[in-house]
Image: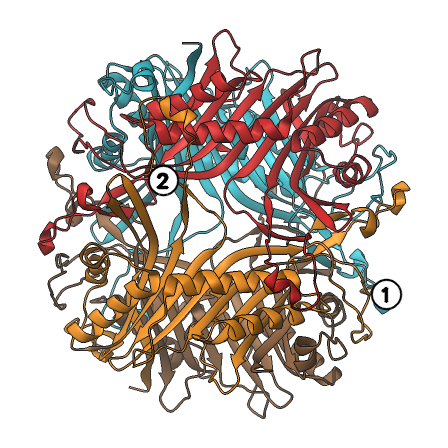
Chain colours: A orange, B red, C cyan, D brown
Amino acid sequence: MPTILGQNQYGKAENRVVKITREGDTHHIKDLNVSVALSGELDEVHYSGSNANVLPTDTTKNTVFAFAKEHGIESAEQFGILLAQHFVDSCEPITKARIRVEEYDWERIETSEANSKFIGADDVRHSFVRKGAETRTAQITYDGEGFQVFSGLKGLTVMNSTNSEFWGYIKDRYTTLREDYDRILATEVTSVWRHSWDGGDKRRPNWEKSYQQTKKHMLHAFAETYSLSLQQTLYQMGSRVINSRAEIDEIRFSMPNKHHFRVDLEPFGIKNETADGAVYYAADRPYGLIEATVLRDGAEALIPVDMTNL
Amino acid sequence: MPTILGQNQYGKAENRVVKITREGDTHHIKDLNVSVALSGELDEVHYSGSNANVLPTDTTKNTVFAFAKEHGIESAEQFGILLAQHFVDSCEPITKARIRVEEYDWERIETSEANSKFIGADDVRHSFVRKGAETRTAQITYDGEGFQVFSGLKGLTVMNSTNSEFWGYIKDRYTTLREDYDRILATEVTSVWRHSWDGGDKRRPNWEKSYQQTKKHMLHAFAETYSLSLQQTLYQMGSRVINSRAEIDEIRFSMPNKHHFRVDLEPFGIKNETADGAVYYAADRPYGLIEATVLRDGAEALIPVDMTNL
Amino acid sequence: MPTILGQNQYGKAENRVVKITREGDTHHIKDLNVSVALSGELDEVHYSGSNANVLPTDTTKNTVFAFAKEHGIESAEQFGILLAQHFVDSCEPITKARIRVEEYDWERIETSEANSKFIGADDVRHSFVRKGAETRTAQITYDGEGFQVFSGLKGLTVMNSTNSEFWGYIKDRYTTLREDYDRILATEVTSVWRHSWDGGDKRRPNWEKSYQQTKKHMLHAFAETYSLSLQQTLYQMGSRVINSRAEIDEIRFSMPNKHHFRVDLEPFGIKNETADGAVYYAADRPYGLIEATVLRDGAEALIPVDMTNL
Amino acid sequence: MPTILGQNQYGKAENRVVKITREGDTHHIKDLNVSVALSGELDEVHYSGSNANVLPTDTTKNTVFAFAKEHGIESAEQFGILLAQHFVDSCEPITKARIRVEEYDWERIETSEANSKFIGADDVRHSFVRKGAETRTAQITYDGEGFQVFSGLKGLTVMNSTNSEFWGYIKDRYTTLREDYDRILATEVTSVWRHSWDGGDKRRPNWEKSYQQTKKHMLHAFAETYSLSLQQTLYQMGSRVINSRAEIDEIRFSMPNKHHFRVDLEPFGIKNETADGAVYYAADRPYGLIEATVLRDGAEALIPVDMTNL
């Protein structure tokens, strides 16, 4: 046969699992989208169609739901660790498991005391409204020896309405852009960061706190950077995270420049200066796209280049 | 010619206008998506292609951006009122204008004092993160005599993790569903409500406050209703809004039942009881879809049936 | 109670039913997305939560799948007629049923004889590739007495790369657009048309042929109209359909003007004339949106204005 | 500074360029979405915000449009080669360029002679309808020395309504799936393949013909494989392409198993056997996801694992 099989993996993608935990009348939600990908001794299923080494994707789905009940969902990362370990350790031909998770966040609907006299619901601790902002992500890989844990987020849209400039760039035959000393800087952040914890002796991070703090540092660095380029802002964000969070060794960003063009109102005899509060056109396409990795000095770069564009 | 022209309208849709207002170093954002639809003496452009009565859609776009600067954007509704009035009053052949608006909400990035020593940004009041939850909507219609103003929202996803039952329904040959005395009730609310203000002597609502209060009442009624059917919950939500907000005469909802099915874990010897905190599968399609209008007694039903499905 | 219930309906939306029919080794597919909406004596389920008059949406789902097997799917329209009639005629409190259908089209994968020696599949008549162009739609309503049948399509994207002009329009203070004597005209057609058949003595249309012919006339009229406005093209399309298809009394279109702007290459010393074959920028938003109904003279306008924007 | 910059790139994404070519009254379309990503000596723009080495993304956009006019668009691949070479060869600090392209296909609207008497359009050769099926893709990378060219497609949805089985798999505690000897096999193919041509002496492929033939082989192998697993079908598709096209050394697939579940109609006393033509429920999520690379024996694996999931 003049062709051979290369890298391959399979599993059930996008298992939408919701776990409710009850503490008396107070409920808690974990709302995840879990994707399983398994690799191993799988040549024959490709070459001859023999499924002798195949744990069906349907079984991987069942396992996700059963584990949610048996072990609960402490965090996306911890749940992924349990699942990855299970598939490799319990199924002989499977030598590697990769679990990807998206997590959707909910917050409580706060009801006033005044309202509690309505209808008869005296103490409402089981009502939630979904926060629509960023989606939290995680990827856990296990190969029977060690773990690799990525955390991340996507869909975090941020804007500085000033303190951004763009000038001093290369001009060639095709350049028409004018330099700008007061522009809007807006982007929709996708980011993936790598924890140094690998399943060994190092202290396991507090995944929930680590996520909240990383996001906070990212937002603060975005807000506080007087920006001469989106690349500079990106680097500040990554640098801030690495410097502030000892458990993180590497972070990658994909940041589209969500262009807000100041509208030319001169034809109508109207000035549209930034200092007076300007009107902008929010463009869809095309958009600048800035991507980069920031590393702790000495750390290895392990986050794939396209990981943040999935 | 045996065919004739019926209802028709035209205009520029989805003008993405962003207005920044500056109060010293503190900035404010209005971020809208504005669609214009004009009607009037437009037979000839259809029959012969004569554009003599046509204000180009490009001009309607320019007007949206120019008005944002000339008049500011006080609220989606107020901006729509100005635009609708302008097109009808200033352009002879145009006898009716309908402005639809989507509004995207942003909140400030709060930075701690501790952080303000970084980078040199001492007081950050121009940095925002987009709230991703519901999109606010509005539709303003003007025909030269009066206004009709709808406000609304879409994409507001809510869940009660208990206090919902479903039983006592019709059983026929095709019924397999089992009655349920403790289920999750989740929906993604789309709603449109009609203000009684029509441009006449009645006091013009405070559009911003009216929206916030309407949404709050909707959420509270959802949370506080012990539900025997999604229809009942819907009616309570509508009724609460009408009873609480004197300026609103009619409200319509489209509420998909976002099914969360309790997973059968019996085959694995695992109990999955709601009382212990159950695991659910969040389904995509199909979904129940519940739609209804609630009216102030004596009010006319004017919100089109499909308005909430656009 | 100072609030009352207005128009309301409920049912299971987006039942994704696929029916395979086998004629020996030759298979045929019908691939539909069916949504059910029922109305009737449903006040109590809203007021008190009593489900005594409610046929569960889960049962309406089961019915869709069972009917696909019991009756087959001759066409989207015929299937909708059977379902609508069933719900109203078999369930006392239900007085009106509305069935909406989307249909996805597949075509056979043609395999050459030369290939048939591979693998052992000697005669491949059960392999299909999904056509991704327009989606066919239908809406069938039944109230116990008569039927109303709409057919339609969405997502049919067409372009004339010349034979389109736009000039002679109104100019006001906000007009900057230049007249154009050779532009691209492109649109994504959404259309709904109403059959005069209402369940009475009139001959029932051949739904499959009617659809194919209507689409063909629409495309031909688009291609053959030298256009002075998109409205003119729309009217020609509607008029051609009404004049060519006796079974259709009314047709409505929603046609976004998918702008293709000729790029200004002057700054680079490059001419970009249409006559030489120009380069265009295909814009996303905003876009002109042209909507209109065309009627057979004397026919009643019954297609809702927003029906084509769902 | 304890952090350092890792892999980085920037450019303008999603330039929607449409090129019309005229041969007398016969027009031709090329409709592309072009994304530019540049790398090189770009540390300073990240560290200090200096743009001295930055060719603005706006300039890369202008270049795409200007090149479409100056050089035409022979094929997605050839256009990408020209652009990649330009950026690296003309801009000192840029050492690597990666061009990604999506191509949308249009076909002519065929009008009958009978129709040509309408309206006055005697010979319609400039009217098109967009084919909605798969999107063609390409990625061209140039580093100043050699090229790497990937071609591909996404959104090609195919179905075999029989000749697919699934049995003989591993059973563990969480397995509930029943073996199936006659199931539907449906998938939405995403594929990327690598040409061996690298800019050196090897004959440059005919990109258009290569694409059409590769797609054809893929479809034929899908149709002609009696399938015992989706992995087997995938491998047959890849193997067929490599064996049939000498210019291609490597191909990768991402193939979701678009599950069509046979509906259980037993509760209604209805048999739903495949042999009689069954009814299926087309599920959305979760879905099996099968991914693999197939290589010419001896070839190097260079297509990134996640490339087919972008």
Decide: few, some or many residues near mark 1? Use Cα within 10 Å; few <14, some 14-19, many ≥20.
few
- Farthest residue, direction right: A269
Asked if the residue at tag 1 contacts the one at tag 2, i.e. Cβ–Cβ closer than 8 Å, the answer is: no
Residue sitting nearer the eye, A128 or C301 = A128
**Which numbered disc, 2 or 1, marks the residue that appears first in the sequence?**
2
Residue sitting nearer the eye, A41 or C297 = A41
Left/right placement of residue A194 relative to residue C309 reads left
Residue sitting nearer the eye, D131 or A55 = A55
- What's the residue at 8%, 54% (across, down)? B269
Question: Three-letter amino acid code at disc 1?
Answer: Pro
Residue sitting nearer the eye, C272 or A64 = A64
**Residue B140 figure quarter:** top right
Residue B170 seen in the current view = yes
**Residue A186 figure quarter:** bottom right
Q: Which mark is residue C33?
A: 2
Q: Which mark is residue C267?
A: 1
Q: Which mark is residue A145?
A: none
Give the percent coordinates (x, y) of residue D85. Answer: 67, 81
Give the percent coordinates (x, y) of residue C141. Answer: 39, 22
Secondary element at tag 1: helix
The chain that hosts pointer 1 is C
Give the percent coordinates (x, y) of residue A46. Answer: 25, 75
The chain that hosts pointer 2 is C
